[in-house]
Amino acid sequence: MINVALPKGRLGESAYKLFCDAGLSADVADMGRKLSFYDKASDANYFWVKPSDVAVYVERGAADIGVVGKDILDENGSDVYELCDLGIGKCKMCVAAKTGFADDASRRLRVATKYVRSAQEYYASVGRRIFVIKLNGSVELAPILGLSDVIFDIVETGATLKANGLSVITEVSQISARLIANKAAYKFVNAEICRIAERLKKAVTV
Amino acid sequence: MKATFDRNALGGEDRAALSLKSLYRSYGYSEYKLSGFEDYSLYAENASFLDGNGVLTFNSGGRLLALRPDVTLSVVKNIADDCESHKLFYDERVYRKSAVHGEQTELRQIGVEVIGEIDEITQAEVCELIMRTLECVAQDRLLDISHAGIVNKIANGAGFFGDVRARAAAFLSSKNSHDFLRFAQSVGANETFANAFLTLITLPQKPSDAIAVLQEVAKSIDISAEVAELKAIADACGERSNIDFSVGGNPEYYNGAVFKGYVRGVPYAVLSGGRYDKLLHKFGKNKEALGFALYLGELGEYFAEKPKRPDAAVVYDERGARRAAKKAAELRASGLDVLLCKTAPEGCGAVYICTGEEND
């Protein structure tokens, strides 16, 4: 049996649909409020966890494989295998600021973000000194209220930014959901994990 | 009664350590003991060898000392720069981040270092010791083998240096071929070498298949000698080994084989090691070196046994105390584990009541 961690919410539902499309699981119409379910046909145990916890479940071996957003994966620095890009949950990691913002390179840039590690790595790579202001939500408010100069966040359509008078000034990276595997599980359940990865890759490209 | 040593009375970690030390002695390896602390400067100057592990320091009379996060650096620093080959093993406590919970902690580490001349026979002997070490802790085990020389040549040829090299290494370590393709294009990597690097990411694990693919790569890139060495190592390690370049191995220190060992039931590598001549050279010692370490302290959960209950309990009160002590001694003499207590615990095999007057 293989244990699969899926993120709760829209991304997890899309990911599970992809598993079904790839013939890896039966489409369960009503999962109700169950946190886990067993799919007899594929001998797989699926469980829904908080999106930011998927990589933790996989890295620590509670799940053999999982589906997680690349933003969370990069932020956590999880020591897992990243076997394929599932092409769902697509968005971009961006730097955004109030429309008309002009950067003053003579002083530290104040960056509000949920993604502290990713922001630090990005600005280190471009040689810009920053102050990071860690926020847990509604990051768009920070520049409006003068808390930060810019925000470092994921942008899907840009509608929230636009509605708040912000605009993207730099696109840092492309984000999408990834299939990840525990490194030890990959050794001992190799054939099954490789089979799942290959079928998902095919389902993505169809 | 003369106390006898009962190996089975030890916990799993101690039993494994005893077996391993006995194994290494049977190959003629000598036990190496380290002093209590190390100067912090040793770790400050070789921070990248510690693989991101922090160092716990303290001040002692103006000297900044460290709790040792690693054993190999200390062995390399202290080993005599003579013509001798040294075959050593150690059983030490290290202080570093735990793979289990990510916190700094004390962990037991047992390992082997060969420093001197590493010829083919020595290399095969260390491979045998690695496999026997894993066998000692688990029936179901696997060893991943990589070769730092192959990774170095291909990465250098692709033009991966500095930060770009670190990012390429991260793609290799996570088997991330999809992002690597975009990355290689974005940094303008040499196409032949970038394709070879991609081959390392997607290489089949089975040694015979992997070697066949690498021999094909060796037709266009000069890695034939390294591939032949990797094949010899994989042959020496036997059927429970895979070739897997995600193992990593810091190019500043490693120049040949790099190992990572896994046992079923533990979600992270429990053994690591490799050929680290470059580390010796960094210390100005013109020697070769090969070694490995088993993270015994990280196997705590794996070795976890049900708490052992006493075979019997003798329950007493003030008036029955003497009789209870006598009864307990009798039972212990017959080989039982006996708890003397005022209330019988749950799960005891037998309970003897010694309360009140002469009524046990």
Image: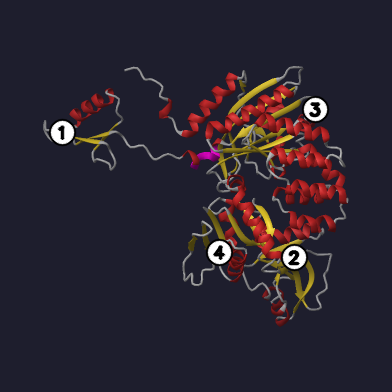
On whether disc 1 and disc 3 are found on a single subunit, the reply is yes
| Disc on the earlier residue, 1 or 3 | 3
Measure how far apart labels 4 and 1 are at the Cα level. Answer: 60 Å
Three-letter amino acid code at disc 3?
Answer: Gly
On whether disc 1 and disc 2 are found on a single subunit, the reply is no
Q: Nearer the viewer, mark 1 or mark 3?
A: 3
Please report, as a chain letter, where disc 1 is located: B
Q: Which residues are magenta?
A: B297-301
Which numbered marker is on residue A50? 4
Please report, as a chain letter, where disc 2 is located: A
Q: Secondary structure at mark 4?
A: loop
Q: Residues within 10 Å of mark 2 (few under 14, many from 20)?
A: some
Residue A101 location (% of width, % of height): 80, 75
Q: Which residue is mark 3?
A: B284
Measure how far apart labels 4 and 2 are at the Cα level. Answer: 22 Å
Q: Nearer the viewer, mark 3 or mark 4?
A: 4
Measure how far apart labels 1 and 2 are at the Cα level. Answer: 79 Å
Q: Is residue B160 above or below residue B305?
A: below
Q: Can you see residue A31?
A: yes
Measure how far apart labels 3 and 4 are at the Cα level. Answer: 51 Å
Residue B86 location (% of width, % of height): 69, 20
Q: Which residue is mark 1?
A: B319
| Secondary structure character of the magenta stretch overall | helix
Residue B279 location (% of width, % of height): 76, 32
Please tell me which residue is depicted at 68% across the width and 66% down the height of the picture: A113
